[in-house]
Amino acid sequence: NSYIDGTLPECLFSMPKLNQLYAGGNRVVGKFPSTNISSNLTKISLPYNSMYGTLPSSFGENSNIILLDLSNNRISGDISMFKNSNKVNKNLDLSLSVNNLSGDIPIALRSLKNIDILAGNVFSCSQDRDTIPTNDPSVDSYDCGSNTLNRYMYFFMIVFALMLLVVLYIFYKDSVII
């Protein structure tokens, strides 16, 4: 077996001569570094590993990144680090699917041509769905996280109201008998 097993050293992401990092499908475990990422690092591909924690803000601050594939990991939190549209490379190929990401999708990401972030995450979106990326392969089948929660909440409220009515009916039916 020729897997990379373990954690990636924090200094790896800030190495000035490193411009591409490919380590997908290995046994890489750990959090992402909190240090700044080298501006020379243009491609980061770490899919199908066990990376966890939140994404560092430096991912959104490096406008030189043209490939960021962190799909199929255990990343949580939001993607607000991409909210500054001046820093997001318009040609960014972004894949963050099948993680545990949530929150709002920044405007800067909605028009990316190569984006795959919806599947396996729980992003919120407006009822008219204009806040989700139109080029994501899951755009037609995506069920917004807030909509799913709302459906469960409405279902719970209806079931609770019906149970309350049944209990009240039984209580008052027995107490009205003279």
Image: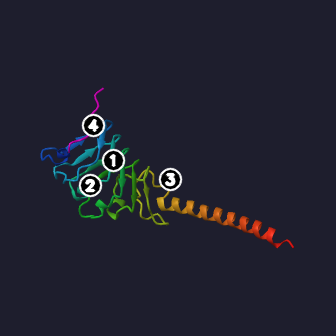
Dot 1, crowdedness within 10 Å: few (<14), some or many (≥20)?
some
Dot in front, 3 or 2: 2
Q: Which residue is mark 2?
A: 56
Kindly identify the amino acid type of the residue bearing the numbered disc 4: Gly
- Residue lying farthest to the right in this orientation: 178
x and y, in percent, of residue 160 in the image: 64, 63
**Magenta residue check for 88:** no
Kindly identify the amino acid type of the residue bearing the numbered disc 3: Ser
State the SS at label 2: loop
Give the distance between the C-alpha atoms of the residues marked 3 and 4, in whole angstroms: 35 Å
Give the distance between the C-alpha atoms of the residues marked 3 and 2, in whole angstroms: 29 Å
Give the distance between the C-alpha atoms of the residues marked 4 and 2, in whole angstroms: 20 Å
Q: Which residue is mark 4?
A: 6
Q: Which residue is mark 3?
A: 141
Dot in front, 1 or 3: 1
Give the distance between the C-alpha atoms of the residues marked 2 and 1, in whole angstroms: 11 Å
State the SS at label 4: strand
Q: Which secondary structure dominates the residues rendered in magenta? A: loop
Q: Which residue is mark 1?
A: 52
**What residue sits 19% from the left and 48% below the top?**
41
x and y, in percent, of residue 14 in the image: 16, 48
